[in-house]
Amino acid sequence: MEGTLYIEIGRRLNAARLENGFTLEYVARKLNVTAKTIRRYEDGDRKVTLGTLKDLCDILGMDYYQLLKDLQGNGGRTPTPIKEVQLDPETMALIDATKELSPADKEKALEIVKLLAKK
């Protein structure tokens, strides 16, 4: 069941990459990984961490927070709930709270959360 979540994530990453006209190599260079790694993410053969998913969304111009919400709601596309990626209600509340922030404010919020996480 967990695999279907990563297949759906990969499908969306692939669609965004192709829509932008990006090659595997281009995205791989931006992420500092191999093209094979990107292909494995897109095929759902390799689990993508939330941090890497955020970076990929930034590169591909995808809304990371909306993607997580879509996956949580399933949208009729994947039977696997987002809990497989371990997002609790508090984390989803943080995502909801930042949805309307500008990219610069999202970066500031991320820095604050990182500082709090170090405590």
Image (cartoon, helix red, strand yellow):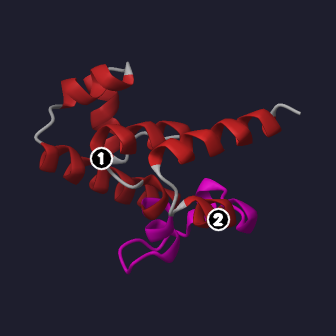
41 to the left or right of 72:
left
Label 1–label 2 contact, CB within 8 A: no
Q: Quadrant of the C terminus?
A: top right
Identify the mark at residue 48; answer none if there is no mark: none
98 to the left or right of 13:
right
Instruction: Identify the mark nearer the N-term, 1 or 2.
Output: 1
Q: Which residue is at 29% across, 20% downward?
A: 29
Count of numbered circles in the view = 2
Instruction: Determine which quarter of the picture holds residue 107.
Output: top right
Nearest the eye: 14 or 31? 31
Identity of the amino acid at label 1?
A: Gly
Residue 47 seen by the camera: no
Element type where label 1 sits in the image: loop
81 to the left or right of 113:
left
Give me the C-alpha separation between circle 1 and circle 2.
21 Å
Q: Position of residue 91 (x, y in %)?
A: 69, 59
Q: Which residue is tagged 2?
A: 92
Considering only vertical position in the picture, is 24 above or below 18? above
Residue 97 seen by the camera: yes
Nearest the eye: 28 or 106? 106
In the image, farthest residue toward the right:
119
Nearest the eye: 3 or 39? 39
In the image, farthest residue toward the bottom:
76
Considering only vertical position in the picture, is 81 above or below 37? below
Q: Which residue is at 55% across, 70% downward?
A: 81
Identity of the amino acid at label 2?
A: Met
Q: Which residue is tagged 1?
A: 61
* Span colored in magenta: 67-91
Q: Which residue is at 46% across, 74% downward?
A: 79
For mark 1, does the 10 Å Cα neighbourhood hold few (<14), some (14 to 19), or many (20 or more) residues? few
